[in-house]
Amino acid sequence: MQTTSQPMSGSGPIRIRVRAAGATWLTVDRADKHNALARPVLAALADAVREAGNRAGSRYIVISGAGDKYFAAGGDLRDLANVRNEAAVHAMMDEAGGALDAIRHCTVPVLAYLNGDAIGGGAELALACDLRLQAVHARIGYIQARLAITSAWGGGPDLFRLLGPARALRMMARAELVDAPTALAWGLADAVIADGAQGSDVADFLKPLDACAPQVLRGIKAQAIAARQGQAWPAHRRVEQDHLARTWLHDDHWAASDKLLHKAAT
């Protein structure tokens, strides 16, 4: 995963690195605060996601946290301390949930690399992503009940959709911290990573995405958005048809077809 020459941003809460093959890695850079998700941090993350998604040739985005202890430790309690009336609560939900919607609606796949624990709002951030790669030592937990609240930023619908009502209710009501092997077995994680972000586990998982044409990944993500939104079959089918037409008529399709035909003839 060779990096390009684009420098990493270091002045804000989000570090950005554009890598070869159209991959963008975004890192929440608040290790000293357990990568807590203050609203300005979420806004900066959403802006970075939108920018990467709009970049020509972009294939996918990976979101991670600084350090190896926390992916994100939920909402920043200092940032949320003054949210003390119903109007402020709804404004907070709209602002922070809207930032996660930028991930849900991003035009390219967004993956979460859980370098450490994803808890509370951090778990909601992980579930807003399309796929989750969980470090072997990391845990994921909807622990909002420990603060006598429920999920806030759209993470509840994401969890119930992914795990089903019984397992999602269990996980939330018991404020469980789910380890990597269990998360993989439940379908909460898509891979367990034993050797870090630069190791072969991540590289092997990402290799097929690196080889997939950008317009194909966008077409697949469009169907994922339709499914997440619960679009009816005809609407989802129209999304599929639209992107099939775009990809079928693209030069990449004909080059791949010619290569396969040539291989079959030899």
Image (spheres, rainbow, N blue to C red):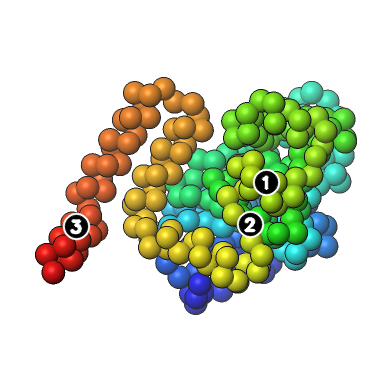
Instruction: State the residue in front, 253 or 139.
Output: 139
Q: Position of residue 169 (x, y in %)?
A: 73, 28
Badge 2 marks a residue whose secondary structure is strand
Q: Which residue is mark 3?
A: 257
Callout 2 amino acid: Val
Q: Which residue is mark 2?
A: 192
Mark 3 or mark 2, earlier in chain:
2
**Residue sitting at x 19%, y 49%:** 249
* Horizontal side, residue 11 vs residue 247: left or right: right
**The C terminus appears in which quarter of the rendering?**
bottom left
| Number of marks present in the image shown | 3
Q: Which residue is mark 1?
A: 183
Instruction: State the residue in front, 33 or 248.
Output: 248
Callout 3 amino acid: Ser
Question: Is there CB contact under 8 Å for labels 2 and 1?
Answer: yes
Badge 3 marks a residue whose secondary structure is helix
